[in-house]
Image: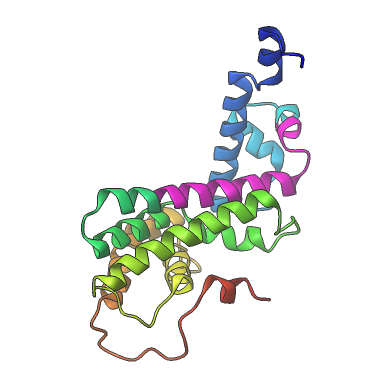
Amino acid sequence: METATPVQRKASRPRADALRNRERIVTAAREMFVEYGPDVPLDEIARRAGVGNATVYRNFPDRDALVREVVCSVMDRTARAAERALAEAGDAFEALERFVHAAADERISALCPMIRSTFDKHHPDLEAARERVDRQIAELMHRAEAAGQLRSDVDVGDIMIAVAQLSRPPAGTDCVHADRFVHRHLQLFLDGLRAPARSALPGTAVTMEDLRRP
């Protein structure tokens, strides 16, 4: 069996500057999708990333490819926030609180219009990122419920709806100014999740499957 030479191995790996450019594009796209929505011109994204249009298209042949990468990036960052909360917080409900606040900082509300776009919602990268997020949040909630700290009539979808809605600026308000109130209102929501529950919730617990159902 032939063994690749060091030169061949080096050539087969993306260069460090190419990887940095790709990450800069994804970061710029994530910021601009939050600020302006998923239809922001790609040349504006290139300008913010500090790269040429050709670099954007070399990494992402079309808008759907870039949108998918941004969605996966946000979901990966959200999953890592859940993993850190699980590892760092000794108190189960405190871990859930840490995750909820960190997820809001990722502005996952910006994912909603992007996920409704035309890209393949069953792409393997997206499926893997989605499963990782679901698994980590479910573990956070399971620990808090097992500790008797989380009410039993909620599910992962309830958490994600609240984070998305409360991190989205109300109509007619400025994003920067609305950000001042996000964590205050999230904490009000989190206090309502604590056991024992003070009231019965209408309807049933919302799962992630419920959110993805057409």
Tell me the residue at 36%/67% (across/down).
141
Query: Which SS type dominates the magenta stretch?
Result: helix
Image quarter in which the N terminus is found: top right
The part of the image, by quadrant, that contains residue 143 is bottom left
Tell me the residue at 68%/15% (across/down): 9
Q: Residue at x 72, y 13 (%)?
A: 3
Is 150 located above or below residue 117 in the figure? below
Question: Which corner quadrant of the image does residue 173 belong to?
Answer: bottom left
> How many marks on residues?
0
The scheme the figure's colours follow is rainbow
Q: Position of residue 153 (x, y in %)?
A: 38, 83
Position above or below: 60 against 126: above
Image spot of residue 22 (x, y percent): 62, 31
Q: Is residue 134 found left or right of 194 in the rendered image?
A: right
Residue lying farthest front?
Answer: 1
**Please, is residue 122 above or below residue 69 in the view?**
below
Residue 37 seen anywhere in this rendered image of the structure: no
Q: Is residue 52 visible?
A: yes
Q: Observer-nearest residue: 175 or 102?
A: 102
Image quarter of residue 202: bottom left
Q: Nearer the viewer, residue 85 or 9?
A: 9
Q: Is residue 148 magenta?
A: no
Q: Which residues, given as a range, are shown in magenta?
A: 56-81
Is 66 included in the stretch rendered in magenta? yes
Q: Quadrant of the C terminus?
A: bottom right
Q: Position of residue 76 (x, y in %)?
A: 51, 48
